[in-house]
Structure formats: structure tokens, C-alpha cells
Image (cartoon, rainbow, N blue to C red):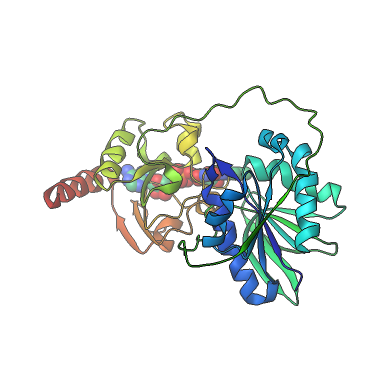
Amino acid sequence: MPGILVVAETADGAIAPISFELLGAARQLSAQGGGSVTAFVAGPESLGAALISHGADSVIAGTSAALASGTAEVLVPAVTAAITQSGADVVLLGQTSFGRDLGPALAFSLKTAVAMDCVELKIDGGRLRVTRGCYGGNARAEHTWKASPQVATVKPKSFDALEADAGRSGSTSAIADAGEARVKVLGTSKAETTGVRLEDAPVVVSGGRGLGDPGAFKMLEELSGLLKGATGASRAACDLGWYPPSQQVGLTGKTVSPGLYIAVAISGASQHMAGMAGSKAIVAINKDGDANMVKVSKFAIVDDYKKVVPALIEEIKKLA
Ligand SMILES: Cc1cc2nc3c(=O)[nH]c(=O)nc-3n(C[C@H](O)[C@H](O)[C@H](O)COP(=O)(O)OP(=O)(O)OC[C@H]3O[C@@H](n4cnc5c(N)ncnc54)[C@H](O)[C@@H]3O)c2cc1C
């Protein structure tokens, strides 16, 4: 098999977590006959060790200083050179601002197609087959490619990263290719987050429109704080201005896959489920026993949240 190229990204000079998830996905494809796994990263060769320990068989570092801008126009020639060098027929990027920009530009330049926002990947008959949500999250579509290479962006938290294994070995090489920059990046700013990041939290407590009152989020924050987690919200709650859009979970919000997801007064619409269905255990607190969230949950408390959440807080405090 020709192989898989993971286009890694960096944050603050280190490999970003999405890159390790992509390597986890690539290793699964490799085990299905997808070939060897190469990672491309824009940056010094020293970044290669982290990629190899998380599953890359080899690393190609794009060392041109021009790549630091991170724009598609400078990256496309470098990634194209990495595809040629590795012989990869599958190219994986994250569904991040980096991948959303680069994936389509790369596919256009290579006269192939890109499938965006994929949540499942497999090798079928020697070719890539991907699954992604469509019709606003109400259906799932499978795609295959007629052209090559097969370029896909992968939704964050769709695949687990492998544990780092310092004993893994692989080769690292450098290329100097870069495109001409026509866009000047004047600056970047980081979104402020306090406490545990929603995407990384081991426990997420989310609230929905059924709370009926924005003040109820204070109660959910107390519960998530006791469980050392983060607080999320449904789109309906965010649209009402009850909670910041940055904390929205779902198709048009964040994707989370915590060990425990507590859904308080959330009905479980498919677009919400698209962002949290990968949670290991879902607990629904809903007064409607027929709500979809109750049906998909591992445990459900069918009652008014105003009774349930304070009682839960009281019990957890006793355990502390
Ligand atoms: C293109 C598109 C993208 C979308 N993206 C997203 C997204 O990213 N995230 C998202 O969340 N939604 C998204 N939506 C909206 C989605 O379809 C639903 O409308 C939304 O998730 C509903 O939010 P909710 O569950 O909070 O509200 P509701 O559906 O109104 O549910 C409220 C729930 O609270 C329960 N309840 C009421 N009172 C109480 C009480 N006192 N105690 C306990 N339970 C109570 C009710 O039984 C009900 O189940 C999207 C929609 C579209 C079309």
C-alpha cells in the first residue's frame, strides 16, 4: 500500500493534540492495510520525536521559515512535496482552522477531492472510505474517492491518541519547499479560558433550554467544579444568551468525549449528540422519560433538575 500522510500542526512550538489523534486514526488504517504512516510538520526536525513516539513511522519536517505563517498558500507546495516523498495515497488533516484552510486548497491544487469533518475512517478494498454527518447532522454519509490522493479532514476527538512510546523508532528528514506568501498574518490572539478546557475535560456537565433560567448554570458550574470538569451547553441555551457560545457542544459547537457527560435538561437532538456521542458514560437528568437523551444514556434520573442537581451536589460534597 502506498501509505498515509498525517499533516501535523503545532501550538506554542509543540505538537498540537489533534496531530496525535490523527496518528491514532492513521495507525488503525495502517493495520487495515493502509501502508506506512508518515507525518509532515512545519517546523524543526526536533519535533519528529514526539510524532514517532505517537505512531509515525517516519517524519518529514518542513523547515522553511516561510511556513511559520501557517497559511495554505505557503503550505501547499511543502505538503505536496511530502506526499511525493512519502508516496502517500491518503492525507489526513484535522478539522481545525488549519485543516479547514489547507485541506480544500491542497485537494484543489492536486486535482483531487477532500472530505471534510470525517468521524470514521476505514480502508475498504484498498481505498479510503469515510463517514461524515450531513443534512445538519440528521444523516450520515459515506464517501470514497475516484481520484488520488484521498484527502480527509478529521473532526477533533473522533479518534483516541495512542500512548506515547519512547521506544518506537523512525526516521526524520527535512524539506525546504514553501509557497509564495500573498497573505500577511498581522497577529494572532488566543481565546481566554479559565479552568479545565471543555474539549479536554474528563467530566462535562451541560445544560439545555429546559433549565428555563440562565442563573441555573451557576448550579451546573458548582457540580462540574466538584467533579473537576467543565461546563457546556446546548445550542438552544447558547442562542438564548444563557451561556457563552464557546461552550456550545454539538455539530456547530465543540466535540467532547469525556469519561462522564451529564446532560441536564437537554433533549438529545441529533445535532447535540454529534458533539458528545463519543462520551464513555452519559447521564441524563430530564423530566421527560421519553427524551432521546434519556434513551441513549447509561444512567438517567427522570425528574425536575431543580430537585436532582442540588441533591447530587450535596451528596458529592459529603464524599469530598
Ligand atoms: C444546522 C443545525 C446545527 C445545530 N447545531 C447544534 C449544536 O451544535 N448543538 C446543539 O445543542 N444543538 C444544535 N442544534 C439545535 C438542535 O437541533 C436542538 O434544537 C437543540 O439541541 C435543543 O436544545 P435543548 O436540548 O437544550 O432544548 P430542548 O430541545 O427544548 O430540550 C429541553 C429539554 O429539557 C427538558 N426539561 C424541561 N424542563 C426540565 C426540568 N425542569 N428538569 C429536567 N428536564 C427538563 C425537556 O424534557 C427537554 O428534553 C442545531 C440545529 C441545526 C438545524
Q: The N terminus lies in which quarter of the figure?
A: bottom right
> Does residue 20 appear to the left or right of 163 in the view shown?
right
Name the residue located 84 percent from the left edge and 47 percent from the top edge.
108
Please, which residue is most extreme toward the top here?
A: 186
The residue drawn where x is 80% and y is 63% is 145
Residue 274's x, y, as percent? 54, 53
Residue at 40 percent across and 62 percent down: it is: 280
Across and down, in percent, residue 276 comes to 47, 53
Query: In the drawing, does residue 17 fall left or right of residue 35?
Result: left
Residue sitting nearer the eye, 77 or 234: 77
The front one of 64 and 33 is 64
Q: Is residue 99 above or below residue 28?
A: above
Is any part of residue 193 visible from this angle? Answer: yes
Residue shown at 22%/45% (left/top)?
A: 307
**Whole-percent x and y of residue 281?**
37, 61
Q: Is residue 252 above or below residue 181?
A: below
- Residue furthest toward the right? 111
Foreground of the two, 238 or 221 = 221
Number of disc labels: 0
**19 left or right of 71 in image:** left
Q: Percent from the top left, x then y, of residue 234?
A: 46, 42
